[in-house]
Image: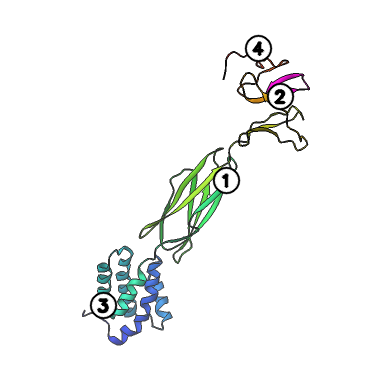
Amino acid sequence: MNNQLSEEKLNRLLLALSPIAKHIAAGNMPDQDALKEILFSIGVETKEWAIEEVESWTKILQKTSTVATDDEKAAIAKELQDRGVPEASAILAVEAAIPPPLKVKPQNIDFGCLKPDEGANATLEVTGKLVKVTVHNNRLKVTLLDRGSGNSLVKVMLLGGSAGESLQDSVVLQGEKGELRVPVRVQWEKEPPKLQYCPRCRRKSLFWNRYDKKFECLNSDCKEPPRLQTCPVCTERSLFWNHYDKKFECLNLKCQVEGPYLDKDKLVRPQGRRYHGSH
């Protein structure tokens, strides 16, 4: 209490409390040069007594970075009051120096559906003191770019995934008080359908539409699909008459029998052996 400044000097310095608190809240601890700039901005000469006093205030307000309870805030405010700072000014300075909670835009990352092996990138804009960024999935890579004044950019790079693979993870943003999780989602397309030769257009453009339960030709010039019959071997509606080769062929990949007659005993595998038994 005995080393308090005179009331006249103290009143001249009080305007420095707010900018000092804002520096601390943003995670930028003001050094002596920064404190001199603050004094200059409020019209106070950078004399030794003034610099020593604002340095003392800075050290006291630094404790707000770990404050967790109202009692702890009151204790810090009491330290300022012990140096002659009015109660209201001390309380306001403590509240202003507490780091704000993290805020992030966007709040989630949805890369949508990508082609196999395709990667992607995204950027997170973070407001508040960001201490650390972590991810758990090895397909995600993050880079932190600190822009100062409590604002940061987080570059998120997604490495390519396999066909049919999906990913659900989070980018964890760790602040001085608490953390934020940004969900990340992505799906990679499945492999394209396996194509067979169309008996009508003779191109490898025929596939089995598993949703509509029918064969379709991807060749736009081939308008009419082959007329299918029930295969006597696999009992699927997948047998057609190949009028080019003059034989029946089954389009069922698990069957694939063929022959000139619609007779189970006459239909054979492409390798030459007959079909013996049901699927």
Identify the residue position indicated by label 4 in the image: 265
Residue sitting at 54 percent across and 40 percent down? 161
| Residue toward you, 226 or 103 | 226
Q: Which secondary structure, mark 3?
A: helix
In this rendering, the count of numbered labels is 4
What is the crowding at mark 2: few (fewer than 14 residues within 10 Å), some, or many (at least 20)?
some
Among numbered discs 2 and 3, the one appearing first in the sequence: 3
Among numbered discs 2 and 4, the one appearing first in the sequence: 2
Range covered by the magenta-colored residues:
239-250
Q: Amino acid at mark 1?
A: Cys
Identify the residue position indicated by label 2 in the image: 240
Identify the residue position indicated by label 3 in the image: 81
Identify the residue position indicated by label 1 in the image: 113
Among numbered discs 1 and 3, the one appearing first in the sequence: 3
Task: List x then y, in percent, for residue 40.
Answer: 42, 80
Which image quarter is the N terminus in? Answer: bottom left
How far apart are the alpha carbons under marks 4 and 3? 103 Å
Quarter residue 218 falls in: top right
How far apart are the alpha carbons under marks 1 and 3? 59 Å
